[in-house]
Image: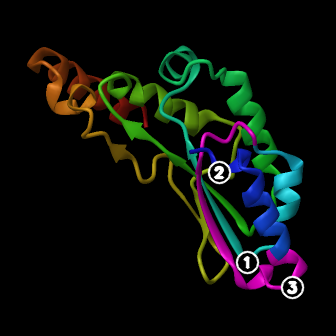
Amino acid sequence: GEPLIIQEHKTFLMEIIKQGRASEVSLRYNTNGLTVSKEWIDIWSQFKHVLIAFSLDAVGDRLEYIRFPTKMTEVEAALSVLESSPDNIEVQFAIAVQLMNIKHMPDFIKWRAKSEFTKPNYRFKEDGSKVSSVLRRPHLIWIPSWYNLRALPDDDKAEVRLLFENLKGWL
């Protein structure tokens, strides 16, 4: 489910804060990110580390098709909120690579490379330096089988290869 809409979860976190233990606790979320708010940032800022795995499988019209009724403007608004969050909050895109988006992955990578958002897919090493990646930790969809990349016809696989070859030249 979507953890950020569960009131009991927020109550639980507030209890950890009330007991003075938040600085000892790390949190990890998988979320569509659409309910991220200043209130959540204020709560998370009190914890040791928070990793937000922001589910984003495509951008633009493809995103709106795959994750209907999500709108790209909602995603960008949520990313803007996360952009100004403190350094203890790490944001990574959790990308489910599948039949409906594989041909659009180069578009996603280009969007990410050109986007104004600097927080997603960056992390701080122990020495304080920043490490970045346009695409980190993609997840291949295996089930249901009709979303699995193995289901692509050979002609489409050749097209995907060409799209990624062209992307390599763009990068």
Q: Distance between the residues labelled 1 and 2?
A: 19 Å
Q: Can residue 45 be seen in this view?
A: no
What is the three-letter code of the residue carrying label 3?
Gly
Q: Residue at x 24, y 40 (%)?
A: 142
**In front: 33, or 167?**
33
Q: Where is residue 67 in the image (x, y as percent from the top left)?
A: 53, 24
Seen in the image, is 118 located left or right of residue 109? right
Q: In which quarter of the image is the C terminus?
A: top left
What is the three-letter code of the residue carrying label 1?
Lys
Dot 1 or dot 3: first in sequence order is 3
Question: How many numbered discs sit on the rendered protein?
Answer: 3
Q: What mark, if any, has residue 48 been given in the picture?
A: 1
Q: Which residue carries the number 2 mark?
A: 3
Among the 4 quarters of the image, the one containing residue 99? top left
Q: Which of marks 1 and 3 is in front?
A: 3
The way the protein has been coloured in the rendering is rainbow
What is the three-letter code of the residue carrying label 2?
Pro
Is residue 24 magenta-colored? yes
Secondary structure of the residue carrying numbered label 1:
loop
| Magenta range | 16-35
Other-residue count near label 1 (Cα within 10 Å), few / some / many at <14 / 14–19 / ≥20: some
Seen in the image, is 116 located left or right of residue 30? right
Other-residue count near label 3 (Cα within 10 Å), few / some / many at <14 / 14–19 / ≥20: few
Q: Residue at x 13, y 15 (%)?
A: 155
Q: Which of marks 1 and 2 is in front?
A: 2
Labels 3 & 2 near each other (Cβ < 8 A): no
